[in-house]
Amino acid sequence: MSIRPLRTEDDYRSAMREIAVFFDDEPEPASPDGERFEVLLTLAEAYELKHFPVDLPDPVEAIKFRMEQAGLTEKDLEPMIGRSSRVYEVLQRKRALTLPMIRKLHAGLAIPAESLIRPLRGARTQ
């Protein structure tokens, strides 16, 4: 199995072409092709993390996304954030999340804590 590190965009594109073939007919995991596929996926993922980083959403966007996914309303957030006026202030970026809110949102909505601890864009600090 001759595999090289992905150092350039051309290396990456070449690996992605080979990976695409495996997606159409995924090989058995323990086979030589299966091992090649796994190694190429790992190399491509490492290249993408380095060259195409994806920034986490800000906390309000993470909350709104989770609300949409689960079909939740602002009322459903009250146990985690507080009374309706506080929920409104958070969702309008007029109030930053507190640590207890972050903990409850993380536990209650399964939003990654990393997304919730980021500063809100445009929110006042407490």
Image: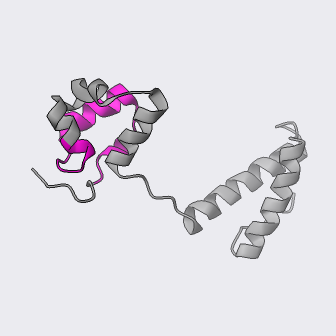
Residue found at x 27% / y 43%: 91
Task: Give coordinates of residue 115: x percent, y percent.
Answer: 37, 47
Q: From the viewer's perspective, is residue 119 above or below residue 47?
A: above
Along the viewing direction, whichever of 45 and 111 lies nearer the viewer: 111
Quarter where residue 12 is shown: bottom right
- Left or right of 15? Residue 75 is left
Quarter where residue 125 is shown: bottom left
Along the viewing direction, whichever of 58 and 93 lies nearer the viewer: 93
Residue found at x 43% / y 53%: 56
Q: From the viewer's perspective, is residue 2 above or below residue 113?
A: below
Residue found at x 30% / y 32%: 105
Region of the chain picked out in magenta, as a range: 89-118
Along the viewing direction, whichever of 120 and 25 lies nearer the viewer: 120
- Left or right of 43? Residue 73 is left
Q: Is residue 117 on the magenta stretch?
A: yes
Task: Give coordinates of residue 11: x percent, y percent.
Answer: 76, 71
Q: Is residue 97 visible?
A: no
Q: Is residue 110 on the magenta stretch?
A: yes
- Left or right of 42? Residue 56 is left
- Left or right of 32? Residue 8 is left
